[in-house]
Amino acid sequence: MIYDDGLLWLGNLNQMEVRQEDLAAKKGGRDTITDLEAGAPDWLAQAAQKTQAASGDDYVQLDCGLLTVNQINIMLQSIVGELTYCDDNHQLMWYNRRAGKKMMAKRTPEQIGASMAQVHPDINNVILHTQQVWHGLRTKASGRDEVWVPVSKGLHQPITHYNRYKRMEDEEGNFRGISEWVVDLKPLAEYYCQTNGLKMVTDPTPQRPDLVPSPGDLAFHQKESGVDSVSGASES
């Protein structure tokens, strides 16, 4: 389900625990490449050299296949939408760069290896919203392993795209990071209607008559130290 109680779920997390989420990537994770400065402009080159990473026409054995690095890059660049992987140390490790295409959630090659605190601007409640997503999925609060966030340009404005955050796990169920899939669902919905002889119409009794607001416009009900408070979350 695309629209559910995901935003309210984030707002109802224990906000004191949320604020302890280490977005600065100081603690390290299972696969953290040590002795490198997170956010260094040449972090990727340094990390590749240190780990002797495969590249170009080098083959990589996957769980169900064998591909070269070039083949993997070509395949991932063809995915509908924008895909990002952040490891369990809150570091941005990869995104499917789509040369020549404007990104809905902008990323740059220089950001690879940067912490979440470095990637996200400290304005409005962006950092808080990022901490909410990470804490909720890292702890698997209420058993949830993903959350969808509709994004618009402002209250009462149409939704432009959706951010889907998914908890990444290994085969033992250990937390290994978060993937983000950013996608504009409108073309897919229009194609579905066209191929099935359907059409989209306005619901006379919509669940959200004011349209689903962006996280920056939605007041979240928060609980801190037994005292309820209200604050706005922000677009990631």
Image (cartoon, rainbow, N blue to C red):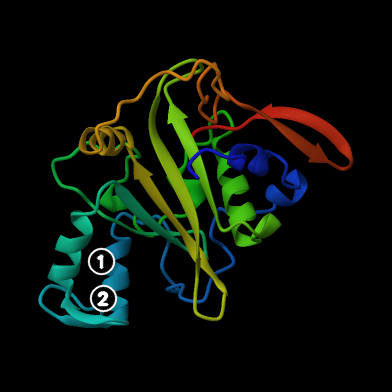
At 60% across and 61% down in the image, what residue appears? Answer: 138
- The residue singled out by tag 2 in the image is 49
Question: Which SS class for mark 2?
Answer: helix
In contact (CB < 8 Å): disc 1 and disc 2? yes
Q: Locate residue 28, reporting x and y percent.
A: 54, 69
Residue 236 visible from this viewpoint: no
Determine the CA span between mark 1 and mark 2. 6 Å
Location of residue 193 by image quarter: top left
Location of residue 186 by image quarter: top left
Q: Is residue 95 left or right of residue 21?
A: left
Q: Is residue 195 left or right of residue 83?
A: left
Q: Locate residue 227, reporting x and y percent.
A: 88, 35
Q: Locate residue 94, reporting x and y percent.
A: 33, 59
Question: Which SS class for mark 1?
Answer: helix
At 50% across and 28% down in the image, what residue appears? Answer: 214
- The residue singled out by tag 1 in the image is 45
At 69% across and 49% down in the image, what residue appears? Answer: 18
Q: Locate residue 101, reporting x and y percent.
A: 17, 39
Q: Residues within 10 Å of mark 1 (few under 14, many from 20)?
A: few
